[in-house]
Image: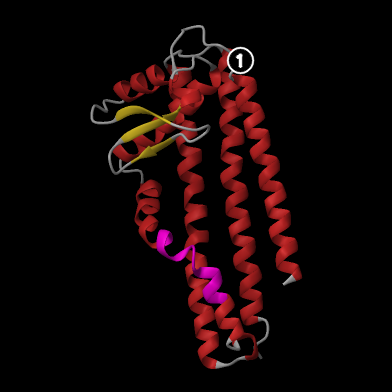
Amino acid sequence: MMGYYILIGAIALISWLVSNKLKSKFKHYSKVHLQNGMSGAEIAEKMLADHGIRDVKVISTAGMLTDHYNPKNKTVNLSEGVYSQRNAAAAAVAAHECGHAVQHAQAYEWLTLRSQLVPVVSVTSGMSMWVVFGGLMLGAAAGVGFGYWVAVAGLVMMAMATLFSFVTLPVEYDASKRALVWLRQKNMVTQQEYKGSEDALKWAARTYLVAAIGSLATLVYWGLQVFGGRD
């Protein structure tokens, strides 16, 4: 178990560093005010309109960096620091979330796959580690049949969460790409503002990358615990 705690500690540390860097970047680019004077909400509404999307609402949500697109009720949810603010960070986040709305409208395959995985992962992710651990307690590492299959079932659950993390990567990177292309093509930002938006989205994407690598590392670790003890 010591190896697992070391692994989790290392992943948590990296995740904390990246998250802090993202918050720092967001704070920095929040001071780069848009020359066009548009708020995050106005940026979002324009991007949706430019893509012919009329059935998605832009609403404000509480918290910091809680921005997200909800495909169920077709809403672009912008945090308080984005919805009403008029800076490069707000423009980047607002356009990024609208990128997801565009993906949804165009049936982007990776977003469709992620949406299909959500019901499964929401049920299995929380219990997967306990199932694996229970299987090990029942003798999976020693090759005992019932415990082994319990542990394997837990690994399958864990693998679904890992798959979800990696499917999320192209979804997030593509949304950022769509956002930046639109911001530049429509001359929504100056060159300086564009660089700030690009940098902010780059660090946001890295949080998903770290999460995916951490999920894979955890899966590999427990897989070695289950299969490593068998002849």
Q: Residue at x 48, y 41 (%)?
A: 172
Q: Position of residue 163 (x, y in %)?
A: 49, 59
Residue 82: percent from left, percent from top: 48, 24
Left or right of 183, for residue 143: right
**Residue 57, horizontal then vertical, whole percent:** 29, 28
Total labels drawn: 1
Quarter occupied by the C terminus: bottom right
Which residue does the image show at 59% across and 51% down from the upper left? Answer: 211
The answer to whether 10 is drawn above or below residue 61 in the figure is below
Q: Give whichever of 101, 173 is nearer the camera.
A: 101
Q: Return the residue at label 1.
A: 31
Q: Residues within 10 Å of mark 1 (few under 14, many from 20)?
A: few
Closer to us: 102 or 72: 72
Q: The residue under label 1 is which amino acid type? A: Lys
Q: Quadrant of residue 129?
A: bottom right
> Can you name the residue that lies furthest to the left here?
55
- Residue 27 on image: x %, y %: 62, 24
The residue nearer to you, when weighing 24 against 196, is 24
Q: Residue furthest front?
A: 62
Q: Which residues are magenta?
A: 121-132
**Way the structure is coloured:** secondary structure
Residue occupying the point 43% across, 12% down: 38
Characterize the magenta stretch by its predominant secondary structure. helix
The image shows residue 68, relative to residue 58, as above or below, that is below
